[in-house]
């Protein structure tokens, strides 16, 4: 079975781990089928190779316990919102039928991230329209909800997922990308990501967002649509930050 309950769609191999890895681990632990779609192979990266990045992505997928991981193969640095990209994304969504999609935030300064956030929103809606793509029209699906991970721009979260029990595994999945992060033995050019402090910054981010809801670690999301809450008492009596 190739269908998933929750699908993370991000630009480059390692973006899923950096942004939503803890949420995917938690959803898997709750019994949901989880998947990741890397839109490009990361061939414009300063360090490593696309082939090496693919092997690292496979290793990271095992740590995240993903049910599937695929690569859409669009050109790194050249992802745009055109009918070609929309149709490719619709085909994937109709095949995998996710109920929830996690992706980049709108307005992200990286063009690929920003374009993919908009591409995912449009494809999610078009995937429910039978006549958009005649080849897969009979496979139209219910519109999946899109949650944008908050990473590079300050946006007030719609909700924060408690990943306290999964922070260590999330960091292990990130470290699977040895070519992209701190490696004292590497002779390749240094970047902000390769600083020995960068991974500490990521962990501190998770702890900060966790503190907003009174837990050890969290991942924040923005949802443009109004959320349909069946039980507000259950929602509003979960552990919250008591000091705000």
Image (tube, rainbow, N blue to C red):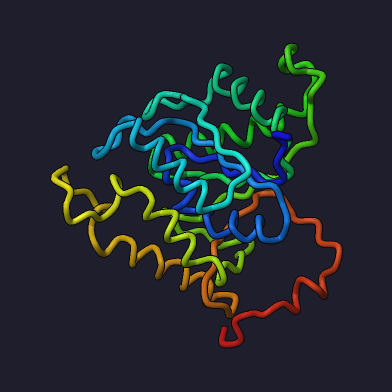
| Residue furthest left in the image | 187
Return the x and y of residue 87 as percentages of the image width and height. Answer: 62, 20
| Residue furthest bottom in the image | 243
Q: Quadrant for the C terminus, please.
A: bottom right
Please name the residue shown 30% across and 60% down the image.
Answer: 198
Return the x and y of residue 199 as percentages of the image width and height. Answer: 34, 62
Between 214 and 54, the one lying in front of the other is 54
Between 73 and 116, the one lying in front of the other is 73
Please name the residue shown 28% across and 45% down the image.
Answer: 179
Q: Is residue 77 above or below residue 8?
A: above
| Residue furthest top in the image | 134
Return the x and y of residue 225 as percentages of the image width and height. Answer: 71, 49
Please name the residue shown 60% across and 39% down the image.
Answer: 68
Q: Is residue 112 above or below residue 65?
A: above
Between 40 and 35, the one lying in front of the other is 35
**Quadrant of the rendered image containing residue 187:** top left
Q: Is residue 29 above or below residue 187?
A: below
Return the x and y of residue 167 as percentages of the image width and height. Answer: 49, 66
| Residue furthest right in the image | 230
Q: Horizontal placement of 197 versus 209: left or right?
A: left
Q: Horizontal placement of 173 versus 66: left or right?
A: left
Q: Quadrant for the N terminus, please.
A: top right
């Amino acid at each position: 079975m190739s269908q998933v309950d929750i699908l993370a769609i991000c630009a480059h191999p390692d973006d899923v781990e950096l942004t939503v890895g803890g949420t995917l681990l938690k959803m898997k632990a709750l019994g949901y089928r989880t998947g990741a779609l890397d839109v490009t192979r990361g061939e414009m990266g300063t360090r490593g190779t696309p082939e090496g990045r693919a092997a690292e992505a496979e290793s990271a997928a095992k740590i995240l316990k993903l049910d599937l991981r695929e690569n859409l193969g669009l050109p790194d640095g050249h992802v745009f919102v055109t009918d070609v990209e929309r149709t490719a994304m619709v085909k994937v969504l109709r095949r995998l039928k996710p109920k929830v999609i996690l992706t980049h935030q709108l307005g992200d300064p990286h063009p690929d991230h920003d374009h993919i956030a908009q591409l995912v929103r449009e494809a999610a809606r078009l995937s429910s329209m039978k006549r958009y793509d005649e080849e897969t029209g009979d496979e139209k699906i219910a519109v999946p909800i899109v949650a944008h991970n908050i990473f590079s721009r300050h946006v007030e979260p719609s909700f924060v997922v408690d990943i306290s029990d999964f922070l260590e595994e999330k960091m292990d999945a990130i470290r699977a990308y040895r070519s992209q992060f701190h490696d004292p033995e590497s002779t390749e050019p240094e970047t902000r990501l390769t600083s020995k402090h960068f991974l500490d910054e990521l962990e501190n981010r998770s702890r900060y967002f966790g503190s907003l809801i009174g837990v050890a670690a969290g991942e924040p999301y923005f949802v443009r649509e109004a959320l349909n809450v069946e039980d507000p008492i259950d929602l509003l009596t979960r552990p919250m930050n008591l000091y705000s």
